[in-house]
Image (tube, grey):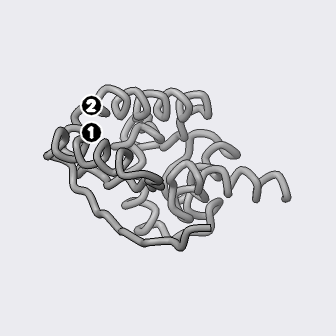
Amino acid sequence: MKQKKKLYNILLEFGLTDKQARAYLASLKIGPATISDLARQADLKRTTLALILEELVRRQIFQIIQRKKRKFYLASAPEQLIALSDKKKQLLIQALPLFQEIAKPVYQTSYQVLKSPSDIQKMLKEIIKNSEIDYQIILRKFPKK
């Protein structure tokens, strides 16, 4: 039972909902099954499970097997979940430059202690040179030691 709970939690981390994870684990346990059999095994209402399975088939986490006039549902192999995850990761990696292009720039905060008038002059020249960057200057006079 501990192992089933661990697998259940992994499926939640993978992005499945509670009921989706229960349906997936039930299907792995019993193999190809009708909605009624799967609902009984997963302890879900048949009508609820039908909606869940529709989504999971769309996401390629379940498959439909047609035998004569009956539909059987089968969870994709765990290896298939890894392949789906890798595919999603690759899509994000490919789109990363586009995301970065539209992302609002984040302000970087840095502090610099200026100890002499020449340090202040250098900093002011840098500010003028990089006019597209916003600066906030805080001045504080410290007593001489």
Picture quarter with the N terminus:
bottom right
Residue holding disc 1: 100
Return the residue nearer the eye: 117 or 129.
Answer: 117
Seen at 50% across and 27% down, the residue is 83
**Name of the residue lying farthest toward the right:** 2
Q: Secondary structure at mark 1?
A: helix
Return the residue nearer the eye: 110 or 43.
Answer: 110
Seen at 49% across and 34% down, the residue is 85
Image mark for residue 58: none
Residue holding disc 2: 97
Image side of residue 123 versus residue 34, left or right: left
Image side of residue 16 versus residue 94, left or right: right
Image side of residue 52 versus residue 79, left or right: left
Taking the image as drawn, is residue 54 in sight?
A: no
Give the Cα distance between marks 1 and 2. 5 Å
Rendering coords of residue 21 (x, y %): 58, 56
Rendering coords of residue 141 (x, y %): 44, 72
Q: Quadrant of residue 60?
A: top left
Seen at 50% across and 50% down, the residue is 34
Crowd class of label 1 (few under 14; some 14 to 19; many from 20; radius 10 Å): few
In the rendered view, tell whether residue 66 sits above or below residue 24: above
Label 1 with label 2: CB-CB less than 8 Å: yes
Which amino acid, mark 1?
Gln
Rendering coords of residue 89 (x, y %): 43, 32
